[in-house]
Amino acid sequence: MTDISDDDSERRSSFRLDMEKELVDIIWTDESGQEKTKKIICLDFARGGLKLDCDISLPVQIAVTVIFRSASANSQKLYGKVLRCIKQDNGWFEIALVLDKDE
């Protein structure tokens, strides 16, 4: 039997929302200092972060702004950092984003 840490247990029991592949906009600054914007798929939203599906890789620890419904006057911005970026069999990348606690 394996021990489950409090963090693992809390993460499993925390609120999680299947986003049904909703499109969101992400903004980040690349290595050359250029601000980049891309529309990507949000797969999952939880209290501490997001799971995204993207056709490009993003560096771990890079700061990212996520904008839900960017065309709407009621759009919402969330701020976070890339925790993981894993290449999938289909060539796309599953990106785990941890949200900033200050926001």
Image: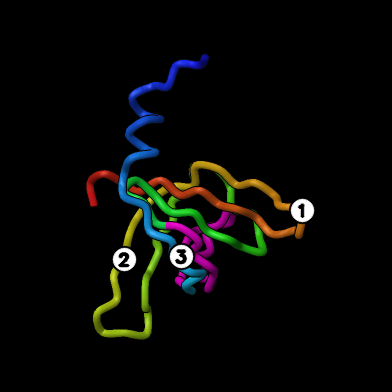
Q: In screen coordinates, is 75 left or right of 43?
A: left
For image coordinates 49% across by 58% down, the residue present is: 29
For image coordinates 50% across by 48% down, the residue present is: 96
- The residue beneath circle 3 is 27
Q: For this rendering, which residue is in front, 100 or 49?
A: 49
Q: Are the residues flagged by discs 3 and 1 in contact, CB closer than 8 Å?
A: no
Q: For this rendering, which residue is in front, 67 or 44?
A: 44
Q: Is 56 part of what is drawn in magenta? A: no
Discs 1/2, front: 1
Discs 3/1, front: 1
Q: In screen coordinates, is 76 left or right of 59?
A: left
The answer to which of marks 1 and 2 sits earlier in the sequence is 2
The answer to which of marks 3 and 2 sits earlier in the sequence is 3
Q: Which residues are magenta?
A: 24-44
- The residue beneath circle 1 is 89
Q: Are the residues flagged by discs 3 and 2 in contact, CB closer than 8 Å?
A: no
Give the CA separation, mark 3 to mark 1: 25 Å
Residue 49 is tagged as none
Q: For this rendering, which residue is in front, 88 or 83?
A: 88
Label 1: element kind: loop
Q: Is residue 13 above or below residue 91?
A: above
Q: Give percent across and percent down for residue 27.
A: 46, 65
Q: Give percent across and percent down for residue 97.
A: 45, 49
Mark 3 Cα-neighbour bin, 10 Å: few <14, some 14–19, many ≥20? some
- The residue beneath circle 2 is 77
Label 2: element kind: strand
Discs 3/2, front: 2
Label 3: element kind: strand
Q: Amino acid at mark 2?
A: Lys
